[in-house]
């Protein structure tokens, strides 16, 4: 018997079918109802409860990014949950001006109720599928969700670009002061660093910028009306085939826009053409940044307490190896 490949259906038909399946999922999971998961809460509030419960201590902007909400809508959602006694704000241990989000006891109990409802719902549906189909379903949904996330990140980046911000390469007049200021404000708020840290950033960046242009060094800046709002630099050593990722920072006004991912994409393309390994130093507790690093293949290599910035923090070193280097080492072993 001859084996004949079944012709792939048209892209338009695939799109129509996937849209129909998506609408059916929305209906059957209950997102069209006023409340979700027998919680008496709107779907967005249910998701907020789940995300805060999964990452206690997150900030409002982190929640807004996860839920794809603008800051004002996220603030209103949090305020409603506070009023309902489900969420509370606590002053950050690093900076009293910054607040962290936690579930109250009532919020934690509600989260358990929502988790049980969702687990029972999924479990009941999976019992109607063969084990092999279950694994195929998980993989397909994972790929689809990832593709949607990438598309949304790209759209947010385009929106940021439309507002006037654009990514440029190399030194730009005024960028040293802007980047040092971004670091000083952010790490003062989150880690309690002061003038010594700002001085180190400004001095190191000035020395680095003076070496540009250089085939093994590059800096990417997000500039809006002459002001730098984000930065990332690669400081490479061609003899060791080793790159150092430095001065990665994004202004609060662009957080959640996908700009950070855009900068990382350009930087990783740059290092993969020239180096076998890339490393960076950061501090424990910066979960949003860590998530982005890990998404690009960085892994935690070491961590230890340090006081070189004037305050005790847990410093972390992340390492990323080029895929081809991993394969070469595997063959050698």
Image (cartoon, rainbow, N blue to C red):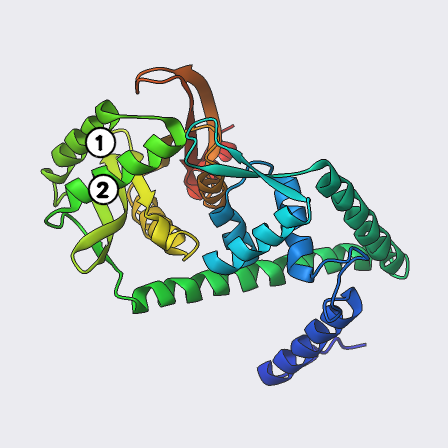
Q: Which mark is residue 201?
A: 1
Question: Which residue is pictured at 33% across the width and 31% down the height?
Answer: 188
Q: Quadrant of residue 20?
A: bottom right
Q: Nearer the viewer, residue 126 or 252?
A: 252
Q: Is residue 29 left or right of residue 15?
A: right
Instruction: State the SS at label 1.
Output: helix
Q: Which mark is residue 179?
A: 2
Instruction: State the SS at label 2.
Output: helix
Q: Which mark is residue 298?
A: none
Residue 148 percent coordinates (x, y): 55, 64
Q: Is residue 230 left or right of residue 14?
A: left
Q: Is residue 175 left or right of residue 241?
A: left
Circles 1 and 2, Cβ within 8 Å, touching? The answer is yes
Residue neighbourhood size for the residue with mark 2, other residues' Cα within 10 Å, grouped as few (<14), some (14–19), many (≥20): many
Q: Quadrant of residue 32?
A: bottom right
The quadrant in which the N terminus is found is: bottom right
Residue neighbourhood size for the residue with mark 1, other residues' Cα within 10 Å, grouped as few (<14), some (14–19), many (≥20): many
Question: Which residue is pictured at 9% across the width and 38% down the height?
Answer: 210
Residue 123 percent coordinates (x, y): 86, 53
Q: Is residue 187 left or right of residue 46?
A: left
Q: Quadrant of residue 155?
A: bottom left
Q: Nearer the viewer, residue 36 or 150?
A: 36
Mark toward the start of the polypeptide (1 vs 2): 2
């Amino acid at each position: 018997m001859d084996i004949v490949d079944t012709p792939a259906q048209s892209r338009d038909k695939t799109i129509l079918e996937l849209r129909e399946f998506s609408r059916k999922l929305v209906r059957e999971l209950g997102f069209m109802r006023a409340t979700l998961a027998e919680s008496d809460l709107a779907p967005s509030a249910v998701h907020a409860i789940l995300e805060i419960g999964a990452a206690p201590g997150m900030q409002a902007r982190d929640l807004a990014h996860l839920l794809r909400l603008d800051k004002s809508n996220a603030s209103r959602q949090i305020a409603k949950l506070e009023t309902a006694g489900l969420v509370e704000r606590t002053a950050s241990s690093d900076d009293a001006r910054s607040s962290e989000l936690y579930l109250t006891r009532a919020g934690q109990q509600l989260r358990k109720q929502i988790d049980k409802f969702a687990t029972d719902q999924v479990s009941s549906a999976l019992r109607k599928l063969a084990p092999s189909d279950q694994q195929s379903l998980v993989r397909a949904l994972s790929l689809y969700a990832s593709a949607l996330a990438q598309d949304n990140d790209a759209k947010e980046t385009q929106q940021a670009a439309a507002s006037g911000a654009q990514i440029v390469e190399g030194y730009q007049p005024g960028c040293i002061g802007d980047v040092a200021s971004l670091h000083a404000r952010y790490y003062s708020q989150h880690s309690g660093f002061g003038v010594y840290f700002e001085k180190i950033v400004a001095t190191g960046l000035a020395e680095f910028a003076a070496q540009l242009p250089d085939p093994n060094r590059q800096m990417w800046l997000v500039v809006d009306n002459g002001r730098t709002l984000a930065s990332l630099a690669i400081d490479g050593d061609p003899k060791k085939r080793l790159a150092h990722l430095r001065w990665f920072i994004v202004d609060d006004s662009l957080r959640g826009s996908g700009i950070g991912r855009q900068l990382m994409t350009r930087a990783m393309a740059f290092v993969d053409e020239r180096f076998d390994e890339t490393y960076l130093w950061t501090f424990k507790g910066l979960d949003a940044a860590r998530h982005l690093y890990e998404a690009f293949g960085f892994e935690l290599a070491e961590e230890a307490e340090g006081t070189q910035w004037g305050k005790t923090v847990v410093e972390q070193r992340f390492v990323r190896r080029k895929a081809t280097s991993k394969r070469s080492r595997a063959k050698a072993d």
